Image (tube, grey):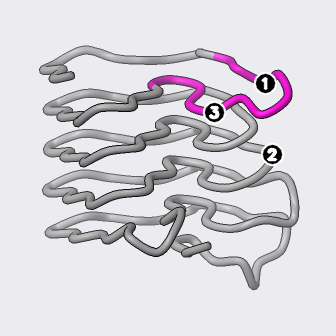
């Protein structure tokens, strides 16, 4: 899936085991100049990606999850370039207020990325976390 321009906002997928309040992708996902804001899910508040993820010139902000990855959660390789990840939140005692790398094969490359003002209920869980 490739998305160029626009906004994905105010989505909600909060049923048991739900993921990806804004976008849930099982195939490769490419976002360019996209805002992913104000979404909610149990995991991956803004984005849940199970395959390769590429994000450029985009904003991931104001998303909320009860579990892992307030802004996004992914389980493969991800590259994020010239983007901002801010104001995301994990309300439970889990990982990655901004980004959660889910599983052993998840890898993140971030180039010129601002990660700021993301909150976890347990501050020790971090803005970017694996697990």
Q: Is residue 36 left or right of residue 56?
A: right
Residue at point 34% right, 17% down? 7
Q: Main secondary structure of the magenta part?
A: loop
- How many residues crowd mark 3 within 10 Å: few (<14), some (14–19), many (20+)? many
Mark number for residue 19? Answer: 3
Q: Is residue 97 left or right of residue 17?
A: left
Spatial CA distance of label 1 from label 2 is 9 Å
| Quadrant the C terminus occupies | bottom right
Residue 6: quadrant of the picture:
top left
Q: Which residues are magenta?
A: 12-23
Give SS at disc 3. Answer: loop
Mark number for residue 66? Answer: 2
73 relative to 22, above or below: below
Q: Is residue 128 left or right of residue 56?
A: right
Give SS at disc 1. Answer: loop
Q: Position of residue 107 (x, y in %)?
A: 32, 71
The mark that comes first in sequence, 1 or 2, is 1
Task: Verify CB contact (< 8 Å) between mark 1 and mark 2.
Answer: yes
- Magenta stretch contains residue 17: yes
The mark that comes first in sequence, 3 or 2, is 3
Choose mark 3 or mark 2, whichever is in front.
Answer: 3
Mark number for residue 14? Answer: 1
Q: Nearer the viewer, residue 103 or 72?
A: 103
28 relative to 109, above or below: above
Spatial CA distance of label 1 from label 3 is 8 Å
- Magenta stretch contains residue 32: no
Give SS at disc 2. Answer: loop
The mark that comes first in sequence, 1 or 3, is 1
- How many residues crowd mark 2 within 10 Å: few (<14), some (14–19), many (20+)? many
| Quadrant the N terminus occupies | top left
């Amino acid at each position: 899936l490739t998305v160029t321009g626009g906004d994905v906002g105010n989505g909600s997928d909060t049923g048991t085991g739900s993921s990806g309040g804004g976008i849930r992708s099982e195939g490769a996902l490419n976002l360019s100049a996209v805002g992913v804001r104000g979404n909610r899910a149990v995991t991956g508040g803004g984005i849940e990606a199970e395959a390769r993820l590429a994000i450029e010139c985009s904003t991931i902000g104001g998303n909320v999850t009860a579990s892992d990855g307030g802004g996004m959660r992914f389980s493969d390789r991800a590259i994020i370039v010239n983007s901002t990840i801010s104001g995301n939140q994990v309300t439970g005692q889990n990982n990655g207020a901004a980004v959660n790398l889910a599983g052993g094969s998840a890898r993140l490359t971030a180039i010129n990325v601002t990660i700021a003002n993301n909150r976890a209920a347990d501050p020790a869980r971090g803005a970017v976390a694996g697990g």
